[in-house]
Amino acid sequence: GDSVTQMEGPVTLSEEAFLTINCTYTATGYPSLFWYVQYPGEGLQLLLKATKADDKGSNKGFEATYRKETTSFHLEKGSVQVSDSAVYFCALGGGADGLTFGKGTHLIIQP
Amino acid sequence: GAVVSQHPSRVICKSGTSVKIECRSLDFQATTMFWYRQFPKQSLMLMATSNEGSKATYEQGVEKDKFLINHASLTLSTLTVTSAHPEDSSFYICSASETGPKADTQYFGPGTRLTVL
């Protein structure tokens, strides 16, 4: 079946550091790929998505590129802020199917 | 836009009782809603897919007689945990997807924390 593997945290960075959260997947077919973010005490929010190979999703300074050849969808941001502290989930699927999630990466940004 | 609400946000019940959780899409119609369960420090696990006007589709290992799902309208799905036991304590999250071009994107509710004593 489908699966998503992402680096487990917590990941601790200083403000303005460069961020990479790795995500790789196995899937049948060509699913859409997503990054969701869960801030403390809140529900999951869609951060960005990509629907086909080589697509780049971007939002709020974050970006991720759908790499079919490496089955990856790594999340990056050039300069993180304290307000980016949250749990980030990589997921695949969409449409009539539910999403398959990675375990989540807890990101802590220190001032 | 694309807001999903859940009610209640927290519920504590005694073992053996049933609990109903509501999931509503507030500003869009959702032909499909999903129910997930999230264990502490774990990922979300899909429990079932709920389609308006038809029976829900359950994932392998999820007891359909224990987790009753009803999707009576295009904006409301309910999950009833019947005869709850302490092992059912968890964080239950629903999501809904729009029809049309955005159908591959799911919008999540804030979740319901269920504690069974």
Image (cartoon, coloured by chain):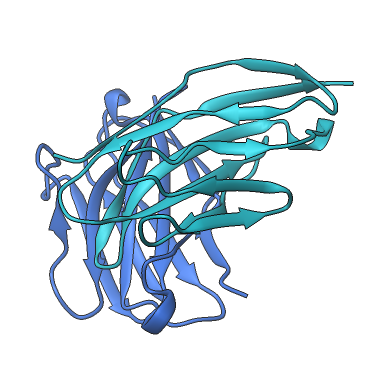
Chain colours: A cyan, B blue
Q: Residue at x 62, y 37 (%)?
A: A76
Q: Quadrant of the C terminus of chain B?
A: top left
The extreme right residue here reads: A111
> Could one spot residue A100 in this view of the protein?
yes
- Residue A75 versus residue A53: which sits nearer the camera? A53
Rendered image quadrant of residue A79: top right
Q: Residue at x 30, y 67 (%)?
A: A95
Residue B22 location in percent, x, y?
42, 61
> Could one spot residue B108 in this view of the protein?
no
Residue A29 location in percent, x, y?
17, 55
- Residue B72 versus residue B104: which sits nearer the camera? B104
Q: Quadrant of the N terminus of chain B?
A: bottom right
Q: Is residue B95 left or right of residue B55?
A: right
* Labels in figure, total: 0
- Residue A80 versus residue B70: which sits nearer the camera? A80
Residue A106 to residue B67: above or below: above
- Residue B89 versus residue B34: which sits nearer the camera? B34
Q: Residue at x 43, y 63 (%)?
A: B23
